[in-house]
Amino acid sequence: MYYGLIIRMIKKYLPKSLLIRAISIVIVPMILFQLVIVTVFFDSLWERVISRMSRSVAMEIALTINQIKNNNLSINQANVDYGSYTEISFTKVDSNELIADYSKNNIGYLDFITAGFKKELQGILQSTHWVQSEDDHINVHINLGEEMIKATFPKKRISTARVHIFLGWVIFTSAIMITISFLFLRNQIKPITQLALAAEEFGKGNNVSNFKVSGASDVRRASIEFIKMKNRITKQVEQRSLMLAGVGHDLKTPLTRMRLQAEILNDEKSKNSLIDEIKHMNLMLDEYLNFSEEDNFKDNIKINPIESVINIKNDIHFNDKDIDLEIVSDAFIEVNANIFNRSIINLINNSFEYANKVKIIIETTSELTKVEIHDNGEGIPEGEMANVFKPFYRIDKSRNQNSTNSGLGLSTTKNLLNSINGTIELANSEILGGLEVRIIIPN
């Protein structure tokens, strides 16, 4: 249980993008490797070099102090005999000058290099001494009892500038390798991203004509299979549409003949009943033909959605209908004209099939267009709300089979909205008590 919890927590913070994950696979081991190299370098090589250099300077100071103390070597002679070769200068200082130096330079703080030198000096020099670090040199104050001697030498004697060059090269080469890896991985992942985008567009019903096969052999094979699948699906859809259109057109001719024959009937009641049935069949065939010609509505003409809804409401077909329109917000936004118009008209017609009052609430922002269509009809059971989007599906209890409804209105509307990244949802209307249809189209 704890193992699964840990895995879920790790996955929560892992990057989601394939490119970032691939880059992380390259960068993380490289950074860990560089940290190991730098740690080993500091713990062994650099620290050992610093220690040996410090020990060498400490021995030189101890040797000179020993000569001054035991052989009565003068300070001037010590500077000539030893200082000229070791870059260490020796001077006499009094106690007041020593106290002033301590208070001015905060002798209590020693950096890493000076602290290492002090440790080495303590093991070699027996006399009481104090170490003082300044910007570019180090002072060692040595108490010889009757006098105080200050030994001064450059800090570069116990440090090396090579460490900075080494660290610089480590960082520089790592940055170059990470940049090269990023460029290479981006080029390798780009075909996968294009394949995902092409599959997404095709899944929305849009035509994918500019997709090209590229990338590694595995990605190329997946791309080729996607193109084959796309062509097979497109061919099947075209065959379905052609068959549906052909059946619709073929049925138009006998229906026309039936209408002509019905006109010559003497029985007015039978005549009117037959003509009504023929009209219903013609309307249903029109819906079939519109469903089969769905791609004709996918153009690039744009329109303001609020103006479009107002025009539809004032259209001659809805003049005598009870339609209320409420505009929540009116931001400048445009949508696909034919798809939006046809979707709204389909939904209004569908509402008036089962209701006598409709309320439209529309809201436009810089991010989306939201349209709610409420009616006072019988509504749809919640268990059937997902099924009504299936082509040719009708609900027997709430949708009269004698109606001209063919079960294609909501299916067609959903397919059209999907092509422009729109969504459609159904719910029970809290305003009019019937059905609420909600459309959301991102900008």
Image: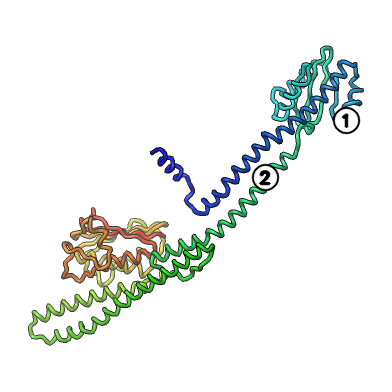
x and y, in percent, of residue 336 in the image: 39, 67
Secondary structure found at label 2? helix
x and y, in percent, of residue 281 in the image: 20, 76
Secondary structure found at label 1? helix
**Amino acid type for the residue under numbered disc 1:** Tyr
Which residue does the image show at 45% across and 69% down from the upper left? 227
* Distance from the alpha carbon under mark 1 to that under mark 2: 35 Å
> Which quarter shows the C terminus?
bottom left
Which residue does the image show at 85% across and 23% down from the upper left? 90
Which residue does the image show at 73% across and 21% down from the upper left? 103
Say which mark, if any, is on residue 170. 2
Tell me where residue 1 sits by quadrant: top left
Asked if residue 113 is positioned above or below residue 17 in the image, the reply reads above
Binning the other alpha carbons within 10 Å of mark 2 as few (below 14), some (14 to 19) or many (20 upward) gives some
Tell me where residue 72 sits by quadrant: top right
384 vs 163, left or right, is: left
349 vs 263, left or right, is: right
Asked if residue 294 is positioned above or below residue 136 in the image, the reply reads below
Asked if residue 393 is positioned above or below residue 268 in the image, the reply reads above
**Amino acid type for the residue under numbered disc 2:** Val
Mark 1 or mark 2, which has the lower sequence index? 1
406 vs 165, left or right, is: left
In the image, 430 versus 227, the foreground residue is 227
From the image, tell me which residue sits under label 1. Answer: 85
